[in-house]
Image (tube, helix red, strand yellow):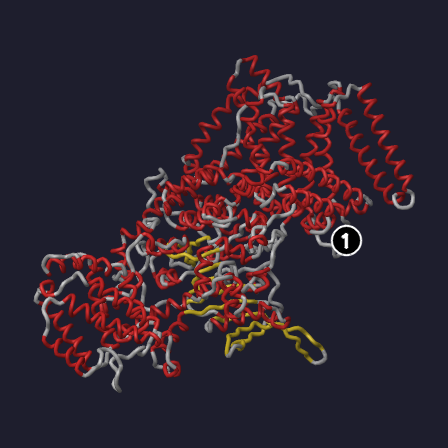
């Protein structure tokens, strides 16, 4: 093991770039004697200066841990890219690439998606295109050579040959179905025999003129269009078209007259009857013909064959349609198992946990406007303009007001909106594609030749007789689909929602009615009496829809309340018994599916039977597509980040890296990175494996907040095998606003902290080898080392500068000419991770969309301040991870999945980010200011900025990112309203029933909730961590002019008199307000005047007799404010003791004062920038650049939709 560590590439880099340059300077530091300390040194005679050595070395050691993270990012980028290239990802990225490989698509489709035995038997193929007839028509009309040459040119394109033959046969079929008159049938038969006779003899061009052929085709297209509409009022038009077509053929195209045709024509004239006209009792044509599903399908296909032309205009303009087409066609060339017949495939179930999220948006939801006057429907019209136009065309409405005149149109509008949000309706629609795909695939497996020729639509619209018959093909397809696929939506509150008359219950029932195979599981709470005692009994119930009502299928009595742990895993656990089959896919409620991807589910399930190494798979990993990436820049950042995580990140962790042996000189790493766990909800479980080994969801409250990863832990510990497959994908919605994203990342970080403390990680740590444990570390705990490194570096510098040791070192280095020591003291010990950590994202975008696109995206992301966003997100993760490690108490945080990106008030941002970002950002800012004032390693501002640039970037990101990424965050009117709202919130009193959003006191109490349930070690850790703030006062007071270079401990002791005086004054003011403010207002004013005069007199004495300066006052603020914050934090940690002493009211007053100071410091720059209108315009462009590039009118949306209605 030691050999492996010493040969690790990061170790060599660390050894020669970090360790070696520090060795000699360390020896020099340890040799410095007689240091003149700037403060009272408790160990002035200590040897070797260990404090300075620790300050220099600790950041370097922590940077080594960061280096391993960097090496992992590089390693995963290279290996993931190579594996993805071998997997043929991104071979078809554009429609141009799709066109170039179109001829090979039918073969690939048949190979993977059509069972091999059926392929050989029927030769089923998708080889015909709809753009060849117009080309062949132009070719024939202008051709002047032999028949054989024309046919050779047509046959050169297999698609054109098939299209010409099909069109000719369909032409005969239409005439045969339409014309029933004896004379007319004889005329048409004669012409067809003549055409086929000359064609067989290769004399067709000698006997028929090709110039009038386009005219004939035009008439026939008009006829087919009328047949497609089947309008009985156009019968006379059909007669005229048939007569015109006969005229074109017999007079314009035929070179020689045919006696039989002449005689038949004269016979009809002599009898006074027009051809094709129904002038007697026996009709000449049947119009409209008998319409069947087969007839409709053939007519539509014939119309497409005759009219569709290959043109760039016909390329889909919708970006989502293009993406789905390219991914599906690309996946056909990837390595996936061949599809079995539906009867032989593994059966599977899909389960979706649902609590009380939106199911289908109501009419009032669509029209409800937010504070900017923007409704959901208006917002979506601007986000999806092309889809809105298609919808209006589909329901045949020209104006939005027409929709509300018809209830059916209103229902369709509600569904149109819901299918573009993160709703249960969208998820159910997507998952039911599995059943639709299975029925079509079973039809191709089971149908006879005659039934295939009739078309699939003839089966999907069965007759009443077929519905009743158990042996009909329709009944067989329904039975096979039900046998192979089950969908259970586990809506645990459905029973309560029904009893309360909640609209969501009605919407869920409608989903069951519209999807008869959908099953809903819920918890039913029933009051039952046993003798004289009434008790609440819980049942797990499964229902389906029958006659527009829900009908109970199963009812299982539970031993007690179902929800005793985390809600979501408990929701899954009670319903898993209702699932069936060998496989189970757990789908979250904000996911979607696509029909073309559902066709590949048979292939995915075959992975359970494939060879994947030592053990068969227990979980099949599936990639996701984030469909919320186009709303704003934040949504785009999250989309790219999540896409990288669910593709290249999972690929590296799940695969044995067998293609990467040439990338690193570490052959022992190539077969041991099988460390992918269960990331999320598209993954497919081996259902039998898991329900016999502890289930798929652990549900202990707090610990199992991230229940999905524990399923992966459980599977791995029980000798399961988790794989990852990228030829199939499922849609996934993500949060689009900064606050939503922060809540989600807080939940993930809390879950990660609980994982770190869990026995599962402990057991994995005992069983993993070195590299698998490192891989687990990189993706969990190791990710949070960055901020620890920043703190270690800055507090080390703070110690060196305030103690005076840094000045002694620099003096020693100048006297000895030791440039190495001076360089070490002025070096930055923090590596910028941003660019290197983005490498996997660049590789994945380049792999799937091209490296030119990837380069452009990365540049645009940086211009849109992606680095600020990711730095800010890091603060969120570190704060909640650290809090969970210290105190536990992880809890679920609902993020909300709304549409409109709205302006968040300053008070809301302050509540959310005060402890996670603002306090830490201000702390780091104070350190940087103190170091700039008292540091000796850098002598000019340029060197200082170079040394501390990354830290200042971190500070600015943590303090101001919530306002940079807040829509209308710099609009002056909004800023004024935000200040009024924040001031009102700060001044409101708390109490029982007052929510945190209404009062600062209630929020302050809520923020300390984690301290109320923590143990002694948690409180002790809070006290120890708070001690760091005393360093500021201890170091700075000795640098004040008023100290007169006195280094005794009395200086520090006397400085506490200032703290005591401030505390006494605050206490006096607080007591005076309670006693005098109401009845003795004059006394209270005199008290405040007395305190003010005393403060001025004290300052005057200090300036006159003790050499106090204005700089000392500013330095004193830097010294005493951190001390007050430390006392506040310690008082909160020791709350029971402080309350016992009767000091809690003073602590609360001190806390309110600090909140006012922090709020003013953060709000002031925002208010100043809001004075300039161009800042707001720049911010809007920054936030919604993606929307602008697609022609969206975000400026109008933010200005208010009312003006444009």
Residue 705 at what x, y percent from top left? 57, 55
Q: Quadrant of residue 503?
A: bottom right
Q: Secondary structure at mark 1?
A: loop
Quadrant assignment for the N terminus: top left
Circle 1: is it few (<14), some (14-19), or many (20+) Cα within 10 Å? few
Residue 283 at what x, y percent from top left? 26, 83
The one nearer the camera, 128 or 686, is 128
Residue 233 at what x, y percent from top left? 35, 76
What residue is rendered at 87% in x and 41% in y? 1072
Tell me if residue 1052 comes above or below residue 780 in the rendering.
Answer: above
Residue that numbered label 1 is attached to: 991
Q: Quadrant of residue 552?
A: bottom right
Quadrant assignment for the C terminus: bottom right
The one nearer the camera, 639 or 348, is 639
Residue 436 at what x, y percent from top left? 39, 68
What residue is rendered at 15% in x and 72% in y? 192
Q: Is residue 1069 left or right of residue 637?
A: right
The reply to whether residue 725 is in sight is no
What residue is rendered at 65% in x and 23% in y? 934
């Amino acid at each position: 093991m030691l050999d492996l560590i010493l040969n690790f590439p990061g170790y060599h880099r660390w050894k020669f770039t970090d360790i070696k340059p520090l060795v000699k300077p360390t020896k020099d530091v340890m040799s410095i004697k007689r240091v003149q300390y700037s403060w009272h040194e408790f160990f002035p005679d200590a040897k070797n200066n260990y404090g300075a050595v620790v300050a220099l070395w600790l950041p370097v050691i922590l940077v080594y841990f960061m280096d391993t993270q960097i090496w992992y990012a590089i390693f995963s980028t290279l290996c993931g890219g190579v594996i993805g290239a071998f997997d043929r990802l991104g071979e078809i990225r554009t429609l141009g690439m799709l066109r170039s490989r179109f001829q090979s698509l039918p073969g690939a489709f048949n190979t993977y998606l059509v069972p091999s035995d059926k392929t050989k038997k029927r030769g089923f193929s998708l080889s015909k295109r709809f753009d060849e007839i117009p080309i062949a028509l132009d070719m024939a009309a202008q051709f002047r050579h032999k028949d054989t040459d024309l046919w050779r040119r047509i046959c050169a394109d297999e698609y054109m040959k098939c299209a010409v033959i099909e069109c000719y046969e369909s032409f005969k079929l239409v005439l045969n179905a339409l014309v029933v008159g004896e004379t007319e049938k004889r005329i048409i038969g004669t012409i067809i025999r003549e055409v086929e006779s000359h064609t067989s003899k290769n004399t067709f061009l000698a006997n028929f003129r090709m110039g009038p052929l386009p005219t004939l085709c035009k008439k026939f297209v008009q006829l087919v269009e009328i047949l497609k509409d089947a309008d009985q009022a156009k019968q006379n038009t059909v007669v005229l078209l048939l007569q015109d077509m006969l005229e074109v053929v017999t007079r314009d195209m035929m070179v020689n007259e045919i006696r039989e045709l002449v005689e038949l024509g004269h016979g009809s004239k002599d009898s006074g009857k027009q051809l094709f006209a129904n002038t007697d009792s026996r009709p000449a044509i049947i119009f409209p013909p008998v319409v069947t599903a087969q007839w409709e399908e053939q007519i539509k296909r014939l119309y497409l064959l005759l009219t569709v032309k290959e043109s760039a205009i016909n390329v889909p303009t919708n970006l989502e349609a293009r993406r789905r087409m390219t991914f599906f066609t690309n996946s056909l060339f990837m390595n996936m198992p061949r599809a079995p017949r539906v009867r032989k495939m593994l059966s599977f179930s899909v389960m979706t946990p649902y609590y009380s999220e939106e199911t289908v948006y109501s009419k009032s939801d669509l029209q409800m406007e937010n504070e900017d006057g923007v409704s959901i429907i208006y917002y979506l019209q601007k986000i999806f303009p092309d889809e809105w136009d298609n919808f209006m065309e589909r329901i045949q409405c020209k104006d939005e007001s027409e929709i509300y005149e018809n209830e059916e149109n209103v229902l369709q509008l509600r569904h149109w909106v819901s299918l573009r949000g993160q709703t249960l309706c969208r998820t159910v629609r997507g998952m039911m594609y599995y059943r639709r795909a299975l029925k079509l695939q079973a039809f191709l497996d089971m149908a006879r030749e005659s039934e295939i020729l009739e078309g699939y639509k003839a089966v999907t619209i069965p007759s009443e007789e077929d519905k009743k018959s158990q042996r009909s093909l329709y009944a067989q397809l329904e039975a096979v689909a039900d046998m192979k696929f089950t969908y259970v939506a586990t809506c645990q509150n459905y029973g309560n929602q029904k009893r309360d008359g909640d609209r969501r219950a009605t919407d869920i029932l409608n989903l069951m009615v519209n999807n008869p195979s959908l099953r809903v599981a819920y918890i039913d709470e029933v009051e039952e009496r046993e003798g004289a005692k009434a008790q609440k009994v819980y049942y797990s119930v499964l229902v389906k829809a029958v006659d527009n009502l829900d009908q109970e299928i199963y009812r299982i009595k539970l031993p007690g309340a179902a929800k005793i742990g985390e809600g979501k895993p408990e929701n899954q656990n009670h319903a898993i018994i209702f699932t069936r089959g060998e496989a189970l896919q757990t789908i979250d409620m904000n996911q979607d599916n696509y029909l073309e991807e559902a066709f590949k589910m048979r292939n995915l399930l075959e992975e359970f039977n494939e060879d994947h190494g030592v053990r068969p798979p227990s979980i099949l990993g599936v990639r996701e597509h984030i469909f919320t990436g186009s709303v704003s820049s934040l949504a785009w950042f999250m989309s790219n980040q999540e896409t990288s995580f669910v593709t290249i990140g999972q690929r590296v962790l799940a695969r044995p890296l067998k293609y990467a042996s040439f990338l690193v000189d570490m052959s022992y790493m190539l077969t041991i990175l099988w460390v992918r766990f269960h990331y999320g909800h598209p993954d497919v479980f081996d259902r039998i494996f898991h329900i016999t080994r502890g289930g798929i969801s652990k549900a202990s409250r707090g610990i199992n907040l991230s229940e999905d990863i524990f399923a992966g832990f459980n599977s791995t510990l029980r000798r399961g095998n988790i794989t990852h497959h990228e030829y199939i994908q499922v849609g996934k919605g993500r949060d689009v606003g900064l606050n939503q994203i922060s809540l989600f990342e807080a939940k993930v970080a809390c879950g990660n902290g609980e994982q770190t403390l869990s026995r599962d990680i402990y057991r994995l740590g005992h069983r993993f080898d070195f590299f698998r444990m490192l891989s687990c570390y990189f993706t969990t705990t190791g990710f949070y080392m960055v901020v620890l490194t920043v703190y270690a570096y800055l507090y080390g510098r703070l110690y060196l500068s305030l103690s005076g040791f840094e000045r002694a070192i620099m003096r020693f280095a100048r006297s000895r000419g030791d440039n190495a020591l001076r360089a070490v003291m002025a070096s930055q010990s923090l590596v910028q991770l941003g660019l290197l950590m983005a490498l996997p994202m660049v590789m994945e975008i380049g792999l799937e969309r091209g490296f030119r696109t990837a380069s452009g995206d990365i540049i645009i992301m940086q211009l849109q301040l992606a680095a600020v966003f990711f730095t800010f997100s890091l603060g969120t993760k570190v704060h909640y991870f650290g809090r969970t490690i210290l105190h536990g108490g992880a809890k679920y945080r609902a993020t909300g999945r709304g549409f409109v990106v709205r302006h968040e008030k300053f008070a809301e941002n302050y509540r959310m980010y005060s402890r996670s970002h603002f306090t830490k950002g201000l702390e780091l800012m104070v350190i940087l200011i103190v170091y700039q004032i008292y540091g000796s390693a850098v002598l000019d501002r340029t060197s200082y900025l170079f040394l501390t640039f990354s830290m200042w970037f971190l500070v600015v990101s943590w303090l101001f990112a919530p306002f940079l990424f807040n829509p209308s965050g710099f609009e002056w009117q909004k800023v004024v309203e935000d200040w009024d709202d924040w001031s009102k919130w700060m001044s409101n009193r708390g109490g029982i029933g007052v929510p945190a959003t209404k009062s600062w006191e209630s929020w302050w109490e809520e923020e300390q909730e984690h301290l109320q349930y923590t143990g002694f070690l948690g409180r002790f850790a809070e006290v120890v961590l708070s001690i760091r703030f005393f360093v500021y006062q201890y170091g700075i007071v000795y640098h004040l002019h008023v100290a007169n270079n006195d280094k005794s401990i009395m200086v520090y002791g006397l400085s506490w008199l200032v703290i005591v005086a401030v505390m006494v004054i605050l206490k006096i003011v607080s007591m005076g307000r309670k006693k005098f403010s109401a009845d003795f207002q004059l006394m209270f004013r005199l008290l405040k005047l007395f305190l003010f005069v005393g403060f001025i007199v004290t300052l005057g004495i200090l300036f006159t007799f003790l050499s106090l300066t204005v700089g000392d006052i500013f330095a004193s603020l830097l010294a005493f404010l951190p001390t007050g914050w430390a006392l506040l934090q310690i008082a909160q940690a020791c709350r029971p003791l402080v309350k016992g002493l009767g000091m809690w009211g003073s602590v609360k007053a001190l806390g309110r004062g600090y909140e006012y100071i922090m709020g003013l410091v953060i709000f002031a720059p925002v208010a100043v920038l809001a004075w300039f209108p161009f800042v707001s315009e720049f911010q809007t462009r920054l936030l919604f650049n993606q929307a602008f590039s697609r022609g969206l009118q975000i400026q109008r949306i933010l200005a208010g939709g009312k003006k444009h209605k």
